[in-house]
Image: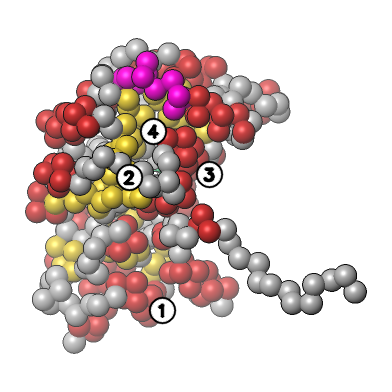
Amino acid sequence: EGYRHTMKDILKSEKLHGVCYEIRGPVMEQASRMEEEGHRILKLNIGNPAPFGFNAPDEIIQDVIHNLAEAQGYVESKGLFAARKAIMQECQTLGIEGVDIDDIYLGNGVSELISMATQALLNTGDELLLPMPNYPLWTAATNLTGANPVLYRCDEQAGWLPDIDDIKSKITPRTRGIVVINPNNPTGAVYPRDLLEQIVEVARQNDLVIFADEIYSKILYDDAEFVPMGRLAKDVLCLSFNGLSKSYRLAGFRSGWMVVSGAKQRAKGFLEGMEILASMRLCGNVPAMFAVQTALGGYQSIQDLVLPGGRLRQQRDLAHRMLNEIPGVSCVKPEGAIYLFPRLHLDQHKIRDDEQLVLDFLREEKILLVQGTAFHWDAPDHLRIVFLPRADELSHSIERLGAFLERYSA
Ligand code: PLP
């Protein structure tokens, strides 16, 4: 007596409708089930450098170990002073003007700061411009705030550069900001200065906040030049995101930062929101903050991987060449980051559901990719491939993909 007799299902909150991080979605669940059955799955789905033998510089690990005893307590919500100082100096070197210690927030990876910044800015019904294709965390974080992601097109024919006219055509009175991912995940495009300047001009004219996700800023190939958004956006509010996960191969440390620059004077309300959210989670992971100063100072060992002869560069070249050799497949050459986003020409490959294609490839070949629609691409004709595995595994995977596509479309 006194108990309710019908026990109701316990549901997720309504806020979570439409919130999904597709890279770790159903396809990954299927891969985990297969692993439990004893299969070895080759994972070309997640940009996680360490498991592929890309170790962080030993100096960083040693420094963290050395400082572990010092890292027992909470620190300020924005993070350890010395780490923020090192980031501030990096901003000076990058030509991002007027950045103070207090303009820098450290967090548990860029991911946490993306959630905080979108929560701090957006109201229900607001709109945030995001690239298509895009790294799906941005869409998920935007949906979680109750705002609507509005996708602007990146043009594959133009090396995946954002289509500035499409951006302009999608601005409404509810548009609050624009997300620019440069170098880009999933396409590997690196944006030229004049295009970035045009985006800043659009932001200026429409009073938009710029979210610059620059986590791949140091993973550049050939002659690609990275231009930090914060250098160009002096009179609009610019939030720049970066961290240790990729350039320093420390994804598991969960260490990232956000830099506020430009129109800070007009952003007092938003920044108050950031401080509220930062203080609600007390502070980020302190041991990892001890890695920041060492990482940013001194020799940048990522260079050894991206220059000619470097492992990442060789793997990119190999994967790019092999993909383009598959009949009915074409792939723009990535100039940055660690991904390829090849196109499967639908006149030659009969594909209606790219998630099913990825599931079938996984089942038959034990190789895990991500379907293009997971990045909110609007046709089932792309895949994302991480080129972190060693050359032999990469070439094996792409050979298997070629053979699979031939069977699939026969
Ligand atoms: N932004 C982009 C474009 C990414 O590709 C990733 C990770 O893959 C992140 C942010 C998240 O990085 P973090 O490990 O700092 O949370």
Residue indicated by mark 1: 363
Question: How packed is label 2: few (under 14 Cα within 10 Å), some, or many (20 or more)?
Answer: many
Amino acid type for the residue under numbered disc 2 = Glu
Left or right, residue 19 beside residue 276: left
* Quadrant in which the C terminus appears: bottom left
Residue indicated by mark 3: 252
In magenta, the rendered stretch is 261-271
The quarter of the image that holds ligand 1 is top left
In the picture shown, does residue 353 fall above or below 287? below
In the picture shown, does residue 316 fall above or below 408? above
Name the mark nearer the viewer: 2 or 4: 2
Whether disc 3's CB lies below 8 Å from ligand 1 is answered: no
Residue nearest the viewer, comparing 235 with 5: 5
Amino acid type for the residue under numbered disc 4 = Phe
Residue indicated by mark 2: 127
Question: How packed is label 3: few (under 14 Cα within 10 Å), some, or many (20 or more)?
Answer: some
In the picture shown, does residue 402 fall above or below 148? below
Whether disc 4's CB lies below 8 Å from ligand 1 is answered: yes
Distance between mark 1 and mark 3 Cα atoms = 28 Å
Whether disc 1's CB lies below 8 Å from ligand 1 is answered: no
**Mark 1 / mark 4, whichever is N-terminal:** 4
**Mark 1 / mark 3, whichever is N-terminal:** 3
* Disc ID at residue 241: 4
Residue nearest the viewer, comparing 217 with 178: 178
Question: How packed is label 4: few (under 14 Cα within 10 Å), some, or many (20 or more)?
Answer: many
In what element is the residue under mark 3? helix
List x then y, in percent, for residue 44.
37, 60
